[in-house]
Every structure is written in structure tokens, then in C-alpha cells.
């Protein structure tokens, strides 16, 4: 049976919960807001299945894909609504057009992040865009297995550790499964997210029930200078109301990028270097200006790693602009491809302070740049401007 000695040894994929034949494992929330398996020893039959499907215990082999693209959806309206180049939408449409099912991550009515499935194109928008929170997988490995056994095409998207968990849960390869993961920086605490959002809205006098869109990667100021945006109740004339902050000013994004409240397993990730077994990996092509500057219009470029060449038929050039690139070029400014987040020395202090202080105040305290560094940064910026003249 699963015996969790260190929290970094659980990535929260729910595979063990879903595989247990007597349902004696439940996920329980800890003080940081992450969920971990708890076993009812009285019901456990010691079959060992929970251990066999654990992606931390059974890690895959490191891989290096041979086919790598910079990619952009030719439909600029789709690309505008996507975090990067709009590739996921194209793949989801292709699977649904074949009568298939797409699993992805969406917000629920309370703006919590959870996995779900759809089988119509109109709902793809729910899955579009990054959600910088660990999702609740619930029983969706089991549901995906049911669709696969029915012969339906299934696209399952998730973090690398979630895809690892899915593959181990299924225990066999399915030709009708398209597994897609992404280059993952790490998953923040749902508790921190919920507390932050409550404070963000309260500070601005916005009722949560009036919010109809939350975007972690809004492109109102461009792809590189992305923004955190909340859209809420429209004016009587139908004009959109929104509040936006560029990522470098938004507390939650700053804390995320500083790795302050990631899941413990993220600092020792079991699925780096494409060990998940996915068919494709999608990411932002950071560093595209150094490789294909003419391809970047600051509206988003995807980085696409192909691990299964049999899936390339889905990448139709009538809908997608593709440019080949090398592995070295692709990972140069995508550190998270191969390396996990570094564990901040202040992480324990952050969660300790959070018990008595607001999320925004606590995040700002630990991400505040010291005065000396701010001065040096401004001097460097000034010199760069002078040199350009």
C-alpha cells in the first residue's frame, strides 16, 4: 500500500484513489491546501495496485523528441484567447470532429480549478488558457478509460505528472488515446489561489457571482507582457468591465513565478525530461526572438514537441503555421523542460505567515524587491537606453 513518508513523494494525480478496487483511499487537504491520499487500513486488502500506478514510484524514461515546431494557429481570434499559439484548440477540434472526447482543465462556478470532459466544439473555450493552480482530477482517469474501451477517440490534457498517472492507471496502450502535457513550472496551492481571489475581488468591490472570466495570461498588453484579468458584470449598455494587472505587478503571479507556494513534489518533479509518456508536449516558445524573430508578432507562439510521429496528421498546415526548430534552440529559454523549480528558503515562512495575514500581504512581503536591487535594476535599464541611442 501507499505509505507517504514525505509530501514531496506525492504529486496529487489521484491515480491511486481511482485504481483502488475497494475504494479505501481518499484525498484529504493539508494545511497548505494540497490533497494527499489517506488509506482506511481496515478496508485495505493490500493488493498493491495503488503503488503500481504511482508516477513517483514508477518514473518513466527520459526522452528527447526528434520533431519540434514553433507553431501558431492561423485563426488570430483563437490565438488571442489562448495563452500561447492556440495549438490546443486545433487538436481538440480535430478529436471532437471524429466523435471523440476531450479532457482538460476548467474553472467551476466558484473559480476553483478542476478537470472535466467535453464532446462539442462550443465548450473548448472552457479549457483554453493557462490555469496556474493544481487541478482536481477527481475520477477522470476512470472516465477516460470508459470512453477508450468504447472505442472513442480521447484527448487527455494535463500536467506531466497527471499524464504519467493516467498512463500507469490504464496499464496498457490505447491507439485511440492522444495524451498531451505541457512544460510545467509547478502547480500552486488551491488554498492560496482561493484566498487570493477573494481578497482581489473584495479590494475592488466586485462580487464573485458577477465574475464571468478569469485570465492568468490575458494578452491585452501582448504575449510577453501578459496580464492577470478578471471580467465581470457588464454595464447596462453591454460594455465589458474588467480589471487587469501586468504579471510583474500582480501578487499571485509574482508569488507563482517566485515558486513560493508550489506543491512539494514540484521541487523534485518525477516527470521532467518528457518522462510522462505523452504523445505531445505544448509550451510557450520563450526565446523565439533568438531563433525565428520574424515568426513572433507578440500575439503568442507555441512550442510543440512531438513524441509520437503518428500524431502529426492532426497538424494541418491549412490551420496551423509551423516552423521546425532544434531541441537546443527550444529549451534554451525553457528551463522547466529539464529542471524542476528551486525550493525557496522562505517557503515555510510564507505558509506560517499566511495563517495570520492576508494572501496578498503575505505574497507581497516575500516578493518585495530590496531597495538596493531596485536601484541597481533602474541603473542597468538606464544604461541600456543610453546604449540604444
Image (cartoon, rainbow, N blue to C red):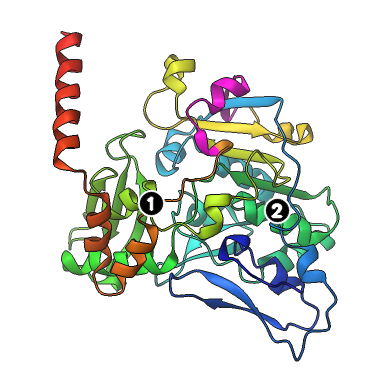
Number of marks? 2
In the depicted structure, whether residue 107 falls above or below residue 185: below
Q: Is residue 94 visible?
A: yes
Left or right of residue 130: residue 242: left
Quarter of the image where one finds residue 99: bottom right
- Residue 192: x, y in percent? 37, 65
- Vertical relation: 279 (above or below) 317: below
Residue at 51% across, 34% down: 335
Q: Indicate yes or no whether the magenta region holds residue 332.
A: yes
Closest to the observer, 108 or 271: 271
Residue wearing tag 2:
164
Tell me which numbered mark, 2 or 1, is placed earlier along the sequence. Answer: 2
The location of residue 48, given as percent across then percent down, is 83, 72
Q: Are marks 2 and 1 in contact (CB under 8 Å)?
A: no
The dot on residue 256 is 1
Q: Position of residue 287 (x, y in %)?
A: 45, 24
Packing grade of label 2 (10 A; few <14, some 14-19, many >=20) is: many
Asked if the magenta segment contains residue 106, the reply would be: no
Residue shown at 24% from the left, 50% from the top: 244
Dot 1: element = helix
Q: CA distance from mark 2 to mark 1?
A: 23 Å
Query: Which span of residues is magenta-colored?
Result: 318-336
Residue 142 appears left or right of 338 = right
Residue at 38% x, 51% y is 256
User: What residue is rendered at 72% in x and 35% in y?
Assistant: 63
Amino acid at each position: 500500500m501507499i505509505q507517504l513518508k514525505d509530501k514531496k513523494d506525492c504529486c496529487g494525480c489521484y491515480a491511486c484513489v481511482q485504481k483502488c478496487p475497494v475504494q479505501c483511499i481518499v484525498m484529504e487537504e493539508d494545511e497548505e491546501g494540497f490533497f494527499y491520499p489517506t488509506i482506511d487500513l481496515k478496508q485495505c486488502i493490500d493488493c498493491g495496485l495503488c503503488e503500481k500506478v504511482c508516477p513517483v514510484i514508477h518514473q518513466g524514461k527520459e526522452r528527447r523528441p526528434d520533431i519540434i515546431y514553433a507553431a501558431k494557429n492561423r485563426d488570430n481570434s483563437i490565438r488571442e484567447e489562448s495563452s500561447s499559439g492556440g495549438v490546443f484548440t486545433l487538436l481538440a477540434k480535430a478529436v471532437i470532429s471524429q466523435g471523440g472526447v476531450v479532457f482538460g482543465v476548467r474553472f467551476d462556478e466558484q473559480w476553483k480549478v478542476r478537470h472535466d470532459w467535453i464532446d462539442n466544439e462550443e465548450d473548448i473555450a472552457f479549457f483554453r488558457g493557462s490555469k496556474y493552480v493544481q487541478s482536481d482530477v477527481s475520477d477522470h482517469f476512470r472516465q477516460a478509460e470508459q470512453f477508450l474501451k468504447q472505442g472513442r477517440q480521447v484527448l487527455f490534457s494535463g500536467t506531466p505528472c497527471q499524464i504519467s498517472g493516467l498512463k500507469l492507471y490504464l496499464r496498457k496502450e490505447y491507439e485511440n488515446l492522444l495524451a498531451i502535457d505541457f512544460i510545467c513550472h509547478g502547480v500552486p496551492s488551491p488554498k492560496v489561489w482561493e484566498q487570493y481571489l477573494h481578497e482581489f475581488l473584495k479590494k475592488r468591490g466586485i462580487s464573485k457571482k458577477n465574475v464571468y472570466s478569469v485570465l492568468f495570461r490575458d494578452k491585452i498588453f501582448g504575449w510577453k507582457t501578459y496580464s492577470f484579468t478578471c471580467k465581470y458584470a457588464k454595464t447596462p449598455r453591454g460594455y465589458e468591465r474588467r480589471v487587469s494587472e501586468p504579471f510583474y505587478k500582480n501578487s499571485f503571479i509574482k508569488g507563482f513565478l517566485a515558486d513560493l507556494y508550489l506543491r512539494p513534489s514540484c521541487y523534485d518533479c518525477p516527470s521532467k525530461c518528457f518522462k510522462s509518456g505523452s504523445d505531445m508536449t505544448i509550451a510557450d516558445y520563450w526565446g523565439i526572438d533568438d531563433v525565428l524573430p520574424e515568426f513572433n508578432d507578440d500575439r503568442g507562439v507555441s512550442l510543440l514537441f512531438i513524441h509520437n510521429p503518428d500524431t502529426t496528421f492532426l497538424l494541418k498546415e491549412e490551420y496551423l503555421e509551423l516552423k521546425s526548430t532544434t531541441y537546443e534552440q527550444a529549451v534554451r529559454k525553457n528551463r522547466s523542460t529539464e529542471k524542476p523549480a528551486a525550493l525557496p528558503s522562505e517557503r515555510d515562512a510564507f505558509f506560517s505567515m499566511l495563517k495570520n495575514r492576508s494572501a496578498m500581504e503575505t505574497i507581497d512581503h516575500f516578493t518585495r524587491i530590496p531597495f538596493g536591487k531596485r536601484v541597481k535594476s533602474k541603473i542597468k535599464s538606464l544604461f541600456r537606453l543610453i546604449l540604444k541611442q
